Image: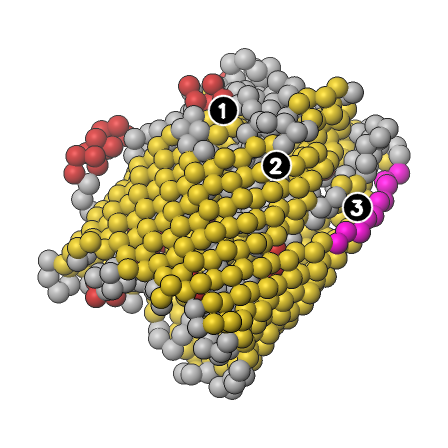
């Protein structure tokens, strides 16, 4: 059956069968909303009690929305936008217009308390999720570097005394195969617990190659898919309750992403071509990539009478290889031995020690801690071979050694029964060192590596102070007002490229975001309705930009300031038994302030331009209806609508993504512990950009379209 016919049938009468871990329980609770618990202050609290704008997505919502990667947060979270350069480990997350211009993210992502310090650590598969929290606005006081725009906090499910398991099989168009399974059990009741889950996913790209207009004469490349990827993921927990007060948890997560028809860094020539012919790409070569990432963590927790002590030790290792990436020009990973070789592993060792107050009814609540990390990095855009001729390559190399230390603390004091004030601060010190070369300093010809000029080593040291202050007034136990100031920072660094023009700094300074926020949180109608509102103003200072200052020479510079201001609203309501409505809306006004980019001795004015990747509005609306026809049979119907307002992807404001809408659906039936779902993504086949170039001043408008309409079926069994 042709795909359009499938979509037509789905539109007329989508009807299928499904289930998730919480559906049986949710039937009992369909007259009330779930209580929202968040960890925005490094300890679990009701969302109503936290003076920060937080979107929390429960396990039930993750499953019923088929939320399988962070890209699905676009629009669902007010003022959140996700863009991707062909793979999950080269993505841009933007919250309130604050986004990345370098390999260090502007939005911190934590997975089970392990921070992804580098953009290369992104793209973890989402499976067996307990909840996802998105803290909107700067959060560096407690979460440190890179929390400029906010924090995405992901928690997976942990083992308990109950033995449970699941198997889920999913197939869809674009040859999608997604298979997941998990098992949790007590090895020794009340003492030792084991949990594990895994995923295998394989999918073809939606683009087909056409060598027309390229230099290739290899017609066998015509019609080949581009953007294929195979993902393998595993997650294992071992938890030991040593005493009634002391526990230890060991966790290992590992993922392999592989493609021999890579979408890594490939794009179409401009946004018009990308939107007019989204399924066609013109490549001379079709490349490959492989990324391997493993997170090891060990958590110890002591629960005292009035406080908790927590220690989190984490080690992350990432390796990457790529070959024949047509950017244009041909790029391959290289360090010292072979074209397309696996780069030396990037390694991050981190340690956090934390103490939290425990008595939630006390007038004083506190959290304080120490944090440190050591990172050895091999950034892919500066560890490569650029092909300049047959079997001839110019070699770029860069090895970074970064170390950071921090002390942080936050105290809340209830001055009056209804009035609470909070103050906090963090002080970070970072030492960075880079060993690198410049264009022409090393070559690889005929299989022989030649060092023409020696590598350079530069170092720099930075520090940052991140204060926080808030005041919250409790109108009653279900309504509050708050006024909060928070600060975010992104670390400075070293431009790992030699031969810089005179006057161009080898290093660059940290950047900062100062957030002023007025909010209201509430629960009404016997917990059948939640309503949250926030108004904010962010001043972004010394923003970092990857600037083209000379031929083949790109450096990060602190180019100027910007601001972002807006309003955000979220609401959830159960108007009828079994029916839940969700709504989120945001308005954002964000601009660069008066500065110019200096290029080749000339100035490109930027002041007054709109902030890149900052939609004017975002809107999300969802309706979910659940009903039982018998004791063992439950039907679930869900539809979602997203509207992303227009925005520019580039700092020059010439590459524009118009407003677009997407529709997702999921319909099904649950019979006892078995289920079958029919789902669609982008049902109306809306065309929009997944990525647009951030810098178009030299005519480069490279863009890539987002995935067309998807349809699939999910079968699951649970015990």
> Can residue 519 be seen from the camera position used here?
yes
> Where is residue 396, by image quadrant?
top right
Q: Find the magenta span and give its range.
A: 454-463
Task: List x then y, in percent, for residue 268.
Answer: 52, 23
Q: Which mark is residue 656?
A: 1
* 158 relative to 275, above or below: below
Element on which disc 1 rests? strand
> Which residue is at the far left?
630
Distance between the Cα atoms at labels 2 and 1? 19 Å
Distance between the Cα atoms at labels 3 and 1? 36 Å
Q: Are marks 3 and 1 in contact (CB under 8 Å)?
A: no
Q: Which mark is residue 434?
A: 3
Element on which disc 2 rests? strand
Residue lying at 35% horizontally and 32% vertically, measured from the top left = 661
Q: Are marks 2 and 1 in contact (CB under 8 Å)?
A: no
- Mark 3: few, some, or many residues within 10 Å (few <14, many ≥20)? many
* 439 relative to 624, above or below: above
- Left or right, 447 with respect to 475, comes to right
Q: Are marks 3 and 2 in contact (CB under 8 Å)?
A: no
Task: List x then y, in percent, for residue 148.
Answer: 60, 48
Task: List x then y, in percent, for residue 322.
Answer: 62, 38
Q: Which mark is residue 562?
A: 2
Residue lying at 36% horizontally and 68% vertically, measured from the top left = 477
Nearer the camera: disc 2 or disc 1:
2
Residue 202 lies within the magenta run: no
132 and 434: which one is in front?
132
Element on which disc 3 rests? strand
Distance between the Cα atoms at labels 3 and 2? 29 Å
Nearer the camera: disc 3 or disc 2:
2
665 and 479: which one is in front?
479
Nearer the camera: disc 3 or disc 1:
1
647 and 410: which one is in front?
410
């Amino acid at each position: 059956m042709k795909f359009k016919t499938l979509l037509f049938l789905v539109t007329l009468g989508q009807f299928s069968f499904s289930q998730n871990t919480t559906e049986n329980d949710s039937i009992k609770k369909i007259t009330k909303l779930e209580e929202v618990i968040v960890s925005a202050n490094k300890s679990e609290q009701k969302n109503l009690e936290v003076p920060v704008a937080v979107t929390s997505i429960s396990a039930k919502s993750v499953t019923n929305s088929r939320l399988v990667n962070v890209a699905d947060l676009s629009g669902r979270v007010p003022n959140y936008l996700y863009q991707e350069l062909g793979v999950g480990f080269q993505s841009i997350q933007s919250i309130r217009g604050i986004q990345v211009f370098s390999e260090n993210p502007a939005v911190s992502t934590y997975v089970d308390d392990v921070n992804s310090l580098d953009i290369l650590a992104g793209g973890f598969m989402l499976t067996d999720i307990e909840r996802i929290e998105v803290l909107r606005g700067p959060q560096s006081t407690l979460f440190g570097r890179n929390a400029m725009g906010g924090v995405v906090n992901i928690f997976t499910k942990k083992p308990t005394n109950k033995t449970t398991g699941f198997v889920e099989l999913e197939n869809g168009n674009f040859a999608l195969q997604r298979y997941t399974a998990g098992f949790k059990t007590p090895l020794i009741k009340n003492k030792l617990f084991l949990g594990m889950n895994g995923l295998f996913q394989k999918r073809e790209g939606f683009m087909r190659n056409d060598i027309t207009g390229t230099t290739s004469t290899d017609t066998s490349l015509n019609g080949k898919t581009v953007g294929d990827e195979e993902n393998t993921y595993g997650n294992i927990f071992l938890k030991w309750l040593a005493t009634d007060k002391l526990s230890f948890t060991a966790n290992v997560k590992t993922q392999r992403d592989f493609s021999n028809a890579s979408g890594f860094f490939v794009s179409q020539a401009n946004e018009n071509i990308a939107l007019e012919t989204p399924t066609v790409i013109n490549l001379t070569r079709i490349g490959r990539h492989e990324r391997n990432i493993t997170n090891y963590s060990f958590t110890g927790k002591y629960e005292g009478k009035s406080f908790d002590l927590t220690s989190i030790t984490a080690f992350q290792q990432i390796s990457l290889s790529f070959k024949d990436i047509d950017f244009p020009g041909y790029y391959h990973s290289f360090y010292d031995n072979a074209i397309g070789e696996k780069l030396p592993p990037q390694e991050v060792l981190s340690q956090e020690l934390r103490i939290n107050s425990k008595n939630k009814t006390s007038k004083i609540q506190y959290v304080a801690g120490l944090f440190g990390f050591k990172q050895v990095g091999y950034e892919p855009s500066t560890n490569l071979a650029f092909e300049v001729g047959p079997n001839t390559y110019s070699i770029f190399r860069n090895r970074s050694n970064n170390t950071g230390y921090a002390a942080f603390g936050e105290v809340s004091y209830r001055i009056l029964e209804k009035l609470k004030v909070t103050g906090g601060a963090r002080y970070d010190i970072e030492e960075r060192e880079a060993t690198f070369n410049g264009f022409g300093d090393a070559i690889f010809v005929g299989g022989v590596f030649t060092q023409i000029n020696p590598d350079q080593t530069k170092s720099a040291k930075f520090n940052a102070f991140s204060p926080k202050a808030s005041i919250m007034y409790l109108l009653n136990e279900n309504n509050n007002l708050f006024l909060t100031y928070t600060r975010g920072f992104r670390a400075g660094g070293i431009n790992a490229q030699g031969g810089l023009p005179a006057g161009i700094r080898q290093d660059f300074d940290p950047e900062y975001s100062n957030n002023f926020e007025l909010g209201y949180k509430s629960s009404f109608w016997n917990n059948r309705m939640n309503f949250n509102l926030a108004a904010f103003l962010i001043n972004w200072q010394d923003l970092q930009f990857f600037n083209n200052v000379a031929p083949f020479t790109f450096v990060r510079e602190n180019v100027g300031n910007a601001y972002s201001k807006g309003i955000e609203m979220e609401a959830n309501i159960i108007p009828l038994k079994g029916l839940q409505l969700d709504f989120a809306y945001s308005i954002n006004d964000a601009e660069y302030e008066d500065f110019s980019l200096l290029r080749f001795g000339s100035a490109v004015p930027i002041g007054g331009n709109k902030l890149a990747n900052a939609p004017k509005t975002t809107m999300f609306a969802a309706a979910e209806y659940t009903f039982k026809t018998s004791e063992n049979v439950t039907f679930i119907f869900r539809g979602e609508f997203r509207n992303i307002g227009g925005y520019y992807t580039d700092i020059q404001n010439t590459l524009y993504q118009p407003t677009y809408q997407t529709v997702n659906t999921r319909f099904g039936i649950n019979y006892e512990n078995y289920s079958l779902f029919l789902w669609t993504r982008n049902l109306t086949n809306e065309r929009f950009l997944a990525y647009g170039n951030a810098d178009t001043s030299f005519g480069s408008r490279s863009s890539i379209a987002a995935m067309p309409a998807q349809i699939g079926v999910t079968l699951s069994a649970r015990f």
